[in-house]
Image: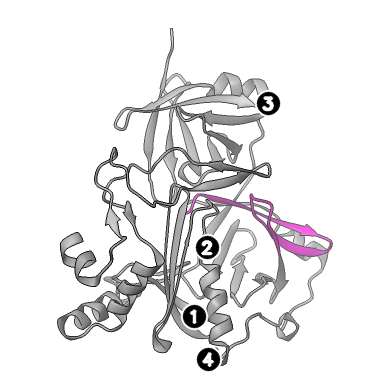
Amino acid sequence: MEEDVFKPLGMKNTFIKTNESTMYQNVARSYRSEDDNIVFNNSGNTVLGINNMYSCIDDLILWERHINNASGDNQKIVQQMNAIIQLDNGRTNNTSSGELTLGQLYGHKERGMFSTYILGSSGGHDSSIFKFPPQNYTAIALSNNGDGYNGYLGVISAHNIMEAHFPEPETTDFNQVKTKILSKKQLQKHEGHYWDQLGELSREIKVINDTLRYVRTNGNINPLIPLSNNKFQMKVQFDDKIYIEFPEEESGIMEFQYLGAEPIEFKKYTQKVYEKQDLIKLFSGIYINKAYNIIYNIKEDNNKLTLSNAKNESIHFTSITSMLFSGDQWYLRSVEFTKDKNQKINGFYVRNNAIRNLWFEKIELN
């Protein structure tokens, strides 16, 4: 990368970290806000080579100009990487984030105009690149405050600078949406907790003040506008088109559709509530993943399971079903315990949108 990309393009402040012990100059230190105080992150990212590329706005501008003005064979490569992935069945890889390209960009309509974006996040550092190819517009955002998604800055900048180019308004006028009046009893048929088995997410559908609402685990709540007995449009601040549908009332299935993507299926469940002593007796203990030598300590804290590690990080879990728990950190979003032939907990699997079935075995201490 240094010889073939960075030097030829004049990217003088871009490099890939290949040695954990090497100290680099002018690297932004990530931080977070905690109880109105600034806390710096001491632990560095040690996934060497894969996601340890450091850069800056000026260098990324050079890269984007190179991509946007490619010619000859380079132009053919760029065109190929911008192509939407075609699956073997002829359909596109249409995810909730957009249609994925071979170059790992997500494409979708922003106020009716095609755009692409790519996001990155690691160790409190976050990046996003938003593009509007027909207008040759690119917005780059870098941050080190640990807040995660910063792409809205690129979207807002595009709204301000290219306002005349967007065929659709910035926000949806819900007064123009054709709605159906449903009784409170009809709305209550859809109430309950729902679990996304692929994304490992829990959501609650609840009637509040005679309006059906979509409740996230972080406390954010969105009203659902009825379009029919079983289909609703989520009321959001911007122009995003989000639909919630209950295909069959007795099936316990809820479908979440975002920006025309393939629907995400949630299944209704009855939440398991444990007593304090049961959490201690059943789940407390030391768990180890032998392949990566990761050790976790699980204990009960304030009627919840809490997991801690060598870095003194604490992850809190909410029970979903009897053996399934949802964590408040993405990398431990879903933990499913298993039992041995004697009906004793012998370990758990970790699952999220990047990991499937990472096994942790319970250690019996003498």
Query: Rounded to the nearest whole Å, what is the CA distance between mark 3 and mark 4?
Result: 58 Å
Q: Is residue 224 above or below residue 192?
A: below
> Dividing the image into 4 quarters, which one contains the N terminus?
bottom left
Mark 4, secondary structure of its residue: helix
Point out residue 296 in the picture as x, y percentages from the top left corner.
Answer: 45, 27
Task: Tell me how far mark 1 sits from mark 3, CA to CA.
Answer: 48 Å
Is residue 333 visible in the rendered image? The answer is yes
Spatial CA span between label 4 and label 2: 23 Å
Say left or right for 295 vs 230.
Answer: left
Give whichever of 2, 110 is nearer the camera. 2
Three-letter amino acid code at disc 4? His
Estimate the x, y position of residue 49 in percent, counting from the top left.
26, 50
Mark found first going from the N terminus, 4 or 2? 2
Residue range corresponding to the magenta coloring? 198-222
**Contact between labelled residues 1 and 2, with CB atoms less than 8 Å apart:** no
Which residue type does callout 2 highlight?
Answer: Asn
Q: Earlier in the sequence, mark 3 or mark 4?
A: 4
Q: Looking at the image, is mark 3 or mark 2 earlier in the sequence?
A: 2
| Dot 3 and dot 4 residues touching (CB under 8 Å) | no
Disc number lying in front (1 or 4) = 4
How much space separates mark 3 and mark 2, taking CA atoms? 40 Å
Secondary element under disc 2, as helix, strand or loop, is loop
Looking at numbered disc 1 in the image, what kind of residue is underneath it?
A: Lys
Secondary structure at numbered mark 3: loop
Q: Which residue is mark 1?
A: 109
Image position of 174 with respect to 29: above or below:
below
Q: Magenta includes 366?
A: no
